[in-house]
Image (spheres, rainbow, N blue to C red):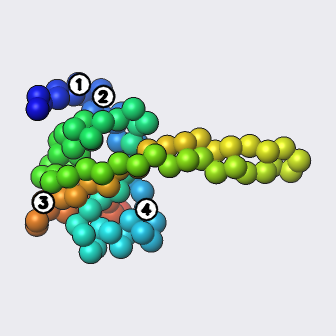
């Protein structure tokens, strides 16, 4: 398997945001995983490399899933939220990503 080289620009665009929810917090504590919202065209090796470089951690595995947008009503008009992609990133033993480290308010 060939190693993918990401440009610096693609590296920073690939991971959109961490997913903070009850489920992602539970997965983080029990299974040493982090959950991210990523670009829809992101591939698993790209996600692995981006997380390793951006957060300086060792990644064991990446699982992805496509989240379908919900149908919502706005008054009399119907609309649909955008589809998006979620990545579950399993970190190596002893590795950790702390999203709240910079917020000491």
Mark 3 = which residue?
92
Badge 1: residue crowd in 10 Å (few <14, some 14–19, many ≥20): few
The quadrant the C terminus occupies is bottom left
Q: Earlier in the sequence, mark 1 or mark 4?
A: 1
Mark 1 = which residue?
7
Badge 3: residue crowd in 10 Å (few <14, some 14–19, many ≥20): some
Asked if the residues shown at circle 3 and circle 4 are in contact, with their CB atoms under 8 angstroms apart, the answer is: no
Q: Is residue 99 left or right of residue 85?
A: left
Asked if the residues shown at circle 1 and circle 4 are in contact, with their CB atoms under 8 angstroms apart, the answer is: no
Q: For the residues marked 1 and 3, what is the alpha-carbon distance in whole angstroms?
A: 24 Å
Q: Is residue 17 left or right of residue 62?
A: right
**Residue at the image position 18 percent from the left and 58 percent from the top:** 91
Mark 2 = which residue?
10
Residue ranking furthest to the right: 76
Badge 4: residue crowd in 10 Å (few <14, some 14–19, many ≥20): few
Asked if the residues shown at circle 4 and circle 2 are in contact, with their CB atoms under 8 angstroms apart, the answer is: no
Asked if the residues shown at circle 1 and circle 3 are in contact, with their CB atoms under 8 angstroms apart, the answer is: no
Query: Can residue 54 be spotted in the picture?
Result: no
Circle 1 SS class: loop
Q: For the residues marked 2 and 1, what is the alpha-carbon distance in whole angstroms?
A: 5 Å
**Residue at the image position 30 percent from the left and 28 percent from the top:** 10
**Residue at the image position 30 percent from the left and 36 percent from the top:** 43
**Residue at the image position 59 percent from the left and 41 percent from the top:** 82
Q: For the residues marked 4 and 2, what is the alpha-carbon distance in whole angstroms?
A: 23 Å
Mark 4 = which residue?
20
Mark 3 or 4, closer to the camera = 3
Q: Earlier in the sequence, mark 1 or mark 3?
A: 1
Q: Earlier in the sequence, mark 2 or mark 3?
A: 2
Q: Quadrant of residue 30?
A: bottom left
Q: For the residues marked 1 and 4, what is the alpha-carbon distance in whole angstroms?
A: 27 Å
Q: Nearer the viewer, residue 9 or 26?
A: 26
């Amino acid at each position: 398997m060939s190693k993918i080289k990401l440009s610096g620009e693609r590296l920073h665009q690939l991971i959109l945001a961490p997913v903070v929810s009850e489920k992602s917090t539970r997965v983080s504590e029990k299974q040493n995983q982090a959950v991210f919202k990523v670009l829809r065209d992101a591939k698993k090796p790209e996600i692995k490399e981006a997380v390793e470089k951006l957060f300086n951690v060792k990644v064991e595995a990446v699982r992805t899933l496509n989240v379908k947008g919900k149908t919502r009503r706005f008054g009399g008009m119907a609309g649909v939220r955008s589809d998006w992609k979620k990545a579950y990133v399993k970190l190596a033993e002893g590795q950790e990503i702390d999203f709240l480290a910079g917020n000491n308010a």
